[in-house]
Image (cartoon, helix red, strand yellow):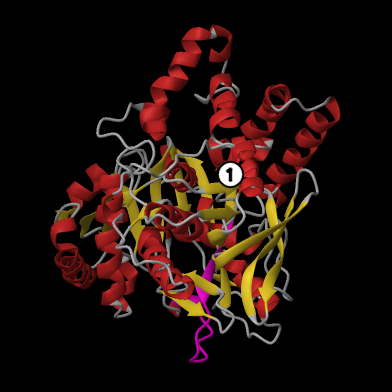
Amino acid sequence: MNAAARPTLSFTRAAALQQIENTPLWDVVVIGGGATGLGIAVDAAHRGLKTLLLERFDFAQGTSSRSTKLVHGGVRYLAQGQLGLVFEALRERGYLLRNAAHLVRKQSFIIPCYSRGSLAKYWAGLKLYDWLSVQHSFGASQWLSAAQVAALLPGVQTNHLCGGIQYFDGQFDDARLALNLAQTAAEQGAALINYMSVERLLKKGSLVSGVEAKDSETGRIYEIPAKVVINAAGVFVDALMQMDAPETKSWVRPSQGIHLVLERSFLPGNAALMIPQTSDGRVLFALPWYNRLLVGTTDTPLHQHSFEPKALDEEIDFVLHNVAQYLTHIPTRKNVQSVFAGLRPLAAPQDGTSKTKEISRSHKLLVAPSGLITITGGKWTTYRKMAEDAVNAAIKVGGFNPAVCTTKNLPIHGCTPAPQIGHWSVYGSDASAIQDLLQQHPEWQQKIAAGHPYTVAEVIWAVRHEMARTVADVLARRLRLLFLDAAAATEAAPLVARIMAKELTQNEAWEKGQIIAFAELARHYLPDAVPVSNAAIINQEK
């Protein structure tokens, strides 16, 4: 199917349900609405395959909205000798900067060094990083004097400072990019729907022939035939593989990472701080994000995992302790405005490695004897390449006419070379339409939370054009208020619930239920509400 003949589907839940009703057989059904699944939906639809994506909750509700907000090659992977992964990620970083210019921007990072030896070591490593980026370079790394480091990183500890290294990577809004990928997939002809859980796999003989899915909003069950099913469920891929073959061994080793959001005053400059080695041997970042300071991350192996992971007490202490060693003004728990946790779907190692920070971030793809395709591992930056590999596999399994992947040249929804400033920039080409709503309905200019720029019009836009179905969808992922200021998000929830109830024609009971549910969710984003460690489920690395 060529681009001219490809239908563009409305990005609404009603349109997706109608497509499920009207389509007797899909070429590809994708399970999972995170970065990988959404990338697969874009690629498959762009190659002319009739594509449906099903997400159990909201798009990017899991790992894909809880990253460190970096589009990067992975400086620390150089030390592990993973040059292939770094090269691939740096290339993909360049594609993202071009194709999602409204969301991805170049960011300066500085490594402060307190010995001459560390200066030389990091200089050599980052020169290799520059070399690997070749034509996709974001800027050459630079050797800085102590005075230059102090000027570019106001608030950094200057006692015994010898100098530093500045390098350049990318920063983005993960949940907004995920949403824009969903919209791009719809523009390419895919149907996508959230709050639709896969209950079982359909089979003809020993081969997977589709899925049985349940609409979480209505309880209705759908049998959805498909030539190919792709399992892109992140940390939950094992459960789907075991639906296919109960004896399947675990393929994922989940690892939890948390982030703290602090006041920008702790590091008020435009550069980001990179701490090259924490007490557990990882790197730590402190970077500007929406006029806040985002600090993370941890690497905590888990033996169990949940749909809404929670930061552990010692993880918060770990981040605060390590960042405090580099700042003149020491942050404490009272300075934390939000804390959030995410799970990495690391491909389980075969060599007995127990430390998750040593597990490769390369992705893994498996085609089962039943034809079920599973893909996991990887990282946000390489989502497009993961999708390309998965769709190539689907073409073989489904016997489709081969079509070359060209998504490296496909602009993502909203992409504009001249995005607007401030918080409007993340909307890209959609910003003007929302601003038109503000002009047409002056009352929608009301801010939903004091001290934050978000308006009533943006809530309405999220419901009408971004498939937001719950208060959490709006405050956590369409707007990032829960991640930036959990207390302010809690205060905004009643107004948002009232607006959404009207837009979705819901009753007062729904509105009250949403307020209660969001308050419970937001409680876990406040540092004083995090649970104590549970030795049965966590094994913090020493």
Count the marks: how many? 1
Residue toward you, 285 or 494: 494
- On the image, the x and y values in percent for residue 504 come to 70, 28
Measured along the vertical axis of the image, is residue 467 above or below residue 275? above
Residue 253 placement, left or right of 202 = left
Name of the residue lying farthest toward the bottom: 351
- On the image, the x and y values in percent for residue 110 come to 27, 54
Residue toward you, 524 or 446: 446
- On the image, the x and y values in percent for residue 111 come to 28, 59
Magenta stretch: give its range.
341-357
The residue that label 1 is drawn on is 338
Please state which amino acid type lies under the numbered disc 1: Ser
| Residue 525 visible in the shown view | no
Residue 220 placement, left or right of 119 = right
Image quadrant in which you'd find residue 430 = top left
Residue 193 placement, left or right of 408 = right
Quadrant of the image containing the C terminus: bottom right
Q: Residue at x 21, y 60 (%)?
A: 162
Measured along the vertical axis of the image, is residue 317 above or below residue 372? above
Task: Label 1, secondary structure: give it.
Answer: strand
